[in-house]
């Protein structure tokens, strides 16, 4: 998949507009690929007709489209009558977290983690229960999870596949996790919006169908935003497997948690109904980029390391044994004109890491790596 640099430089989205023209942006998790033609044409139809009236019935298209997509792609069928539409994934996650907690209650996250999880807990006056994952493979560790829990812990924010490490928790890790959450009667919010971006030889495992003890306590969040490059379209579907969450949600008026716009709905339905071959092309490009980055880093003398991600389009780079071990992203912005996401945003223990977004053309990946490794070896 090719990318058009002129188009990218003219975009108004934050990825390409935040820094000047000399900087290659590889920070926020947006792709550089043009979305699929079918998505563009569905949105164009709305524009051409000026069809901006109410479309509440889009919910009746979105939910079945997601359920069928999940069944075909991930092997389980979310019951449609237990699903709900939200404006975005963070909207769904925060709504469910707030319904199950009071100020001061504990909410678990596994760090390093996508930074808005921590902000969501803190801004709501809940207590962050930070369970630190350990590199290089970032596996779930039952004892540290168990030791972090107390009688005030209510909710776990889970991210499968995991941003930023690209780890996919295995069946064994899920089993250990399920036993502990059941013992402590916790609600699990499983953010699975990276599920469709899994590399060859790996498989996404949704939490809900993979353990009996997770069934009545898990809310699964799905979205086309990452796999189909639609983050600005704003749309999310969640399967609310927990009966208590469903009854909490039913007590709120219809508009309380928001809905997607016509554009978000149309783009998302088109992605799930017609997007398979576009997604396959995008995945091939991303896989090629991942393998290129991994092998370049492996053979480079700078001391830089990257655990091979099993999913996502994110490289979690460890600079601790390099000449730029302190605030590497800040140094690299200055010394190499590349914008990575700073590691300490994902966890206080991650100051010597940075996250690299490689969902772009190979020419940009090559230039970015060249700049980064030259700066590291200078
Ligand atoms: C794990 C994870 N959850 C949620 C989001 C944000 O999704 P949304 O824009 O739908 O709220 C992201 C964005 O990168 C993400 O990586």
Image (cartoon, rainbow, N blue to C red):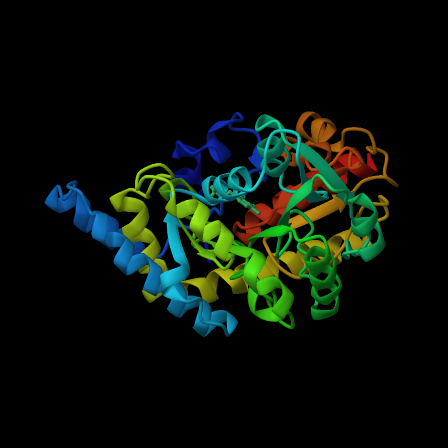
Observer-nearest of 158 and 33: 158
Q: Is residue 101 left or right of residue 276?
A: right
Q: Is residue 306 visible?
A: yes
Task: Answer above or below: position of 135 versus 338.
Answer: below
Q: Is residue 349 left or right of residue 246?
A: right
* Residue 44 in picture, x, y percent from top left: 21, 48
Q: How many numbered marks are there?
A: 0
Task: Answer above or below: position of 51 versus 239.
Answer: above
Residue at the extreme right of the image, as rendered: 321
> What is the quadrant of the C terminus in the image?
top right
Observer-nearest of 25 and 28: 28
What residue is drawn where x is 68% and y is 45%?
369
* Residue 229 in picture, x, y percent from top left: 44, 49
What residue is drawn where x is 38% and y is 69%?
68
Task: Answer above or below: position of 281 versus 101.
Answer: below
Q: Is residue 175 left or right of residue 200?
A: right
What residue is drawn where x is 43% and y is 43%?
88
Observer-nearest of 258 and 266: 258
* Residue 278 in picture, x, y percent from top left: 40, 63
Q: Is residue 11 left or right of residue 137?
A: left
What residue is drawn where x is 74% and y is 39%?
130
* Residue 346 in picture, x, y percent from top left: 69, 37
Q: Is residue 277 visible?
A: no
């Amino acid at each position: 998949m090719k990318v058009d640099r002129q188009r990218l430089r003219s975009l108004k989205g934050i990825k390409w507009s935040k820094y000047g023209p000399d900087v290659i942006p590889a920070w926020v998790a947006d792709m550089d690929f043009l979305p699929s033609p079918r998505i563009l044409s569905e949105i164009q139809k709305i524009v051409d007709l000026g069809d901006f009236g109410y479309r509440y019935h889009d919910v009746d298209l979105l939910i079945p489209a997601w359920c069928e997509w999940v069944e075909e792609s991930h092997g389980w069928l979310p019951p449609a009558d237990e699903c709900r539409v939200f404006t975005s994934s963070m909207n769904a996650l925060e709504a469910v977290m707030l319904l199950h907690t009071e100020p001061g209650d504990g909410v678990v996250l596994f760090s390093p983690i996508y930074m808005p999880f921590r902000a969501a807990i803190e801004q709501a006056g809940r207590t962050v229960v930070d369970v630190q994952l350990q590199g290089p493979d970032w596996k779930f560790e039952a004892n540290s999870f168990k030791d972090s829990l107390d009688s005030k812990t209510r909710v776990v924010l889970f991210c499968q596949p995991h941003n930023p490490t690209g780890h996919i928790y295995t069946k064994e890790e899920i089993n250990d996790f399920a036993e502990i959450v059941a013992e402590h009667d916790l609600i699990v919010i499983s953010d699975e919006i990276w599920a469709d971006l899994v590399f060859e030889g790996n498989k996404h495992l949704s939490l809900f169908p993979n353990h009996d003890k997770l069934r009545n306590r898990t809310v699964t969040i799905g979205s086309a935003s990452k796999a189909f490059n639609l983050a600005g379209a704003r749309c999310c579907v969640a399967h609310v497997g927990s009966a208590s969450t469903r009854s909490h949600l039913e007590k709120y008026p219809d508009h309380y948690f928001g809905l997607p716009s016509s554009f978000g709905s149309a783009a998302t339905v088109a992605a799930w109904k017609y997007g398979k071959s576009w997604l396959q092309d995008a995945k091939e490009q991303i896989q090629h980029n991942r393998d290129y980055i991994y092998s370049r880093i492996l053979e480079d003398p700078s001391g830089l390391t990257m655990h091979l991600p099993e999913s996502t389009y994110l490289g979690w780079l460890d600079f601790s044994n390099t000449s730029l071990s302190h605030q590497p992203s800040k140094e690299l912005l200055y010394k190499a004109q590349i914008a990575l996401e700073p590691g300490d945003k994902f966890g206080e223990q991650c100051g010597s890491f940075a996250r690299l977004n490689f969902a772009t053309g190979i020419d940009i990946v090559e230039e970015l790596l060249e700049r980064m490794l030259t700066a590291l070896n200078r």
